[in-house]
Amino acid sequence: MTDVRPAMTRPDAVRAAVRARGWVLDVDGCLVRTATAGGTGGVPIPGAVELLRWLRRSERDFIVCTNASQRPVQDYAKHLRAIGLDVADGEMMTAATAAADHIAIHHRGLSVLVVGDRGLEAALLERQIELAQPGGAPAGVVVVGAADVYASSVLNAACLAIADHGAAFYVTVDTPWFHGGIGRSIASSSAIAAAIAAVTGRKAEVCGKPSPAIGEVLQSRLGGDGSRIVVVGDMASIEIRLAHQMGALGVLVMSGGTSAAEIPGLEPTHRPHLQVADVGALVELIKTIEPQGDNNDQST
C-alpha cells in the first residue's frame, strides 16, 4: 500500500534531510548527466561530488540506486568512481540486484530464465540461483531486464514458461522512457515485458524503482525506519513515489526527467517534500544548517 508522508515547509524539509541517517541517491539525471542508463558515458552534475563527500564525512549511510540492469553492479560503481564519484561497490544498487534479492527471498529453489543481459545473470548467480536455458526444463521464474539484443529463442521460452507452466514473471522497470538529463530513450526492459504480457496475458511485477520490492531492500539496508531516510531523484513518478511508499523524505531535483510544468498537477504520491534545481542546490541548503546537522545528532 502506498502511503503519503505529510507535506512540510521548505525549512522543515531541509532540517529533516540533514537529520536523516540514510540516503538513497538516484544516478541518471540526479548525480550524473547522461544519455545512457546507470551513468555510463556521463559526467557528474555540479554538486554531486560534494554531496557524497558530505554524506561520508557526516557518517550517513547511503545507497546509490539506479534502475539500470544491463551490466553487473560492480561495473556501474567502477564507472562512477572513474568520473570522480566516490561510490564503493557495496554502496551501489541496481534494478537487477533488487530483482535478484526479491527472487532469492520469494522463489528460492526455482530456476530463473533471464530475458536480458549480464547484469541480471551476474546478480542471480551471486545469490546461488540456478539459471534456466531455452530448450531446457521450463523456468519457474522469468525476469526481464535491459539488453541491446533479445534472442527469439529466449522470448519463446519465456512466453511458454509463463503461459503454459505458470512461471512467476518480473521486470526490472515498467517506465516507458529513460531520462538521464540528455534527451530520452526507450526503456527496453519495459517494452519487452509489455510484449511478453501481450502474448501471455500476464503482466510482469516490477522489482526496480518505485516498487515495494526495492523499497523493502533499501529500508532493510538503511536501518528499516523510513522516517529517517531521504530519497533524492529527478523523477517524481519514480523516486518521489518511492519515498512516499517508504515513508521517507522525497527530494526532487529538476535536472532530469521532471519539468517545472508538471509540478502543479502532480498527484499526492508524486509530490516532493523538497524541490531543488539540482544536487548542487541541495548541498547549498545543507550548508545553511550544517552546524546543527553535522554532529551525528540522532534526534528527530
Image (cartoon, rainbow, N blue to C red):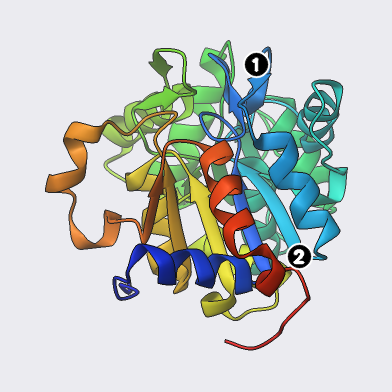
Amino acid type, label 2: Arg
Residue position marked by numbered label 1 in the rendering: 42
In the picture, measured across the screen, residue 67 lies left or right of residue 196, that is right
Q: Position of residue 8 (x, y in %)?
A: 32, 71
Residue for point 35% across, 74% down: 5
Q: Residue at x 80, y 47 (%)?
A: 53
Q: Position of residue 131 (x, y in %)?
A: 74, 40
**One can see residue 116 in this view:** no
Write the residue at 32% across / 38% down. 200
Foreground of the two, 120 or 208:
208
Label 2: which residue?
A: 60
- Under mark 1, the amino acid is Gly
| 3D distance between C-alphas at marks 2 and 1 | 26 Å
Foreground pick, 131 / 98 = 98
Say above or below: 1 vs 231.
Answer: below
Judged from the image, the secondary structure of the residue bearing numbered disc 2 is: loop
